[in-house]
Image (spheres, helix red, strand yellow):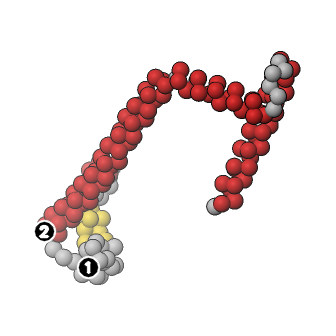
């Protein structure tokens, strides 16, 4: 994990050095009062500080927008979590209702499975006959 970080830092350092030398060379062509990289770094830092003070109002608006986005994302995550919990509750309730209305079956028993009207055509059968092969820990049949 240290290798990608160090290589990224090395790349950034090389890019900064290349950028500074290019700017220094272009500034040397324009004026001769920059003597070395330290002078250039000072000029760049001063320019950055000026830009930061000018853009402070925009940054405040961006930060407040980011806070709103984060709070919206948190609300979405909470809603998803509660929806999943409620879905599990509903499934357990449906299973309990089904267990009350249908008698327990043993392995090898024949059962009729009704087909909903929306899933069948006019000529299809109302029920399918099935055989119980196994039961799992939750009480479901295969």
Q: How far across and how far down the image is residue 66, in percent?
A: 43, 35
Q: Quadrant of residue 32?
A: top right
Q: Residues within 10 Å of mark 2 (few under 14, many from 20)?
A: few
Q: For the image shown, how many numbered marks are present on the structure?
A: 2
Residue 22 is labelled as none
Nearer-N-terminus badge (1/2):
2
Q: Position of residue 10 (x, y in %)?
A: 74, 49
Residue pictured at 31% horizontal, 48% vertical: 78
Compared with 73, 102 (above or below) is: below
Cβ atoms under marks 1 and 2 closer than 8 Å: no
Task: Write the residue at 29% across / 77% down.
Answer: 137
Structural crowding at the residue carrying mark 1, measured as other residues with C-alpha within 10 Å and reported as few (<14), some (14–19) or many (≥20): few
Is 56 above or below relative to 89?
above
- Residue displayed at 65% across by 30% down: 45
Where residue 109 appears, as percent x and y from the top left, is: 26, 79
Relative horizontal placement of residue 100, taking residue 114 as reference (left or right): left
Quadrant in the picture for the N terminus: bottom right
Q: In the rendered view of the protein, which quadrant contains the C terminus?
A: bottom left
Q: Which residue is mark 2?
A: 100
Q: Is residue 94 left or right of residue 24?
A: left
Q: Going 26% across and 65% down the picture, which residue do you hit?
A: 113
User: Do we see residue 128 in this rendering?
Assistant: yes
Query: How far is disc 1 from disc 2 in space, using C-alphas?
Result: 18 Å
Mark 1 lies on residue: 109
């Amino acid at each position: 994990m240290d290798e990608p970080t160090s290589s990224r830092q090395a790349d950034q350092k090389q890019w900064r050095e290349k950028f500074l030398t290019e700017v220094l060379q272009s500034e040397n062509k324009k004026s001769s009062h920059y003597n070395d990289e330290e002078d250039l770094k000072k000029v760049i830092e001063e320019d950055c500080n000026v830009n930061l003070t000018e853009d402070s109002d925009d940054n405040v608006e961006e930060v407040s927008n980011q806070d709103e986005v984060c709070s919206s994302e948190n609300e979405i995550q909470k809603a998803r979590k509660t929806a999943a919990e409620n879905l599990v509750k509903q499934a357990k309730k449906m299973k309990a209702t089904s267990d009350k209305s249908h008698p327990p079956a043993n392995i090898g028993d024949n059962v009729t499975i009704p087909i909903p009207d929306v899933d069948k055509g006019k000529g299809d059968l109302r029920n399918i006959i099935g055989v119980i092969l196994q039961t799992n820990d939750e009480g479901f049949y295969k």
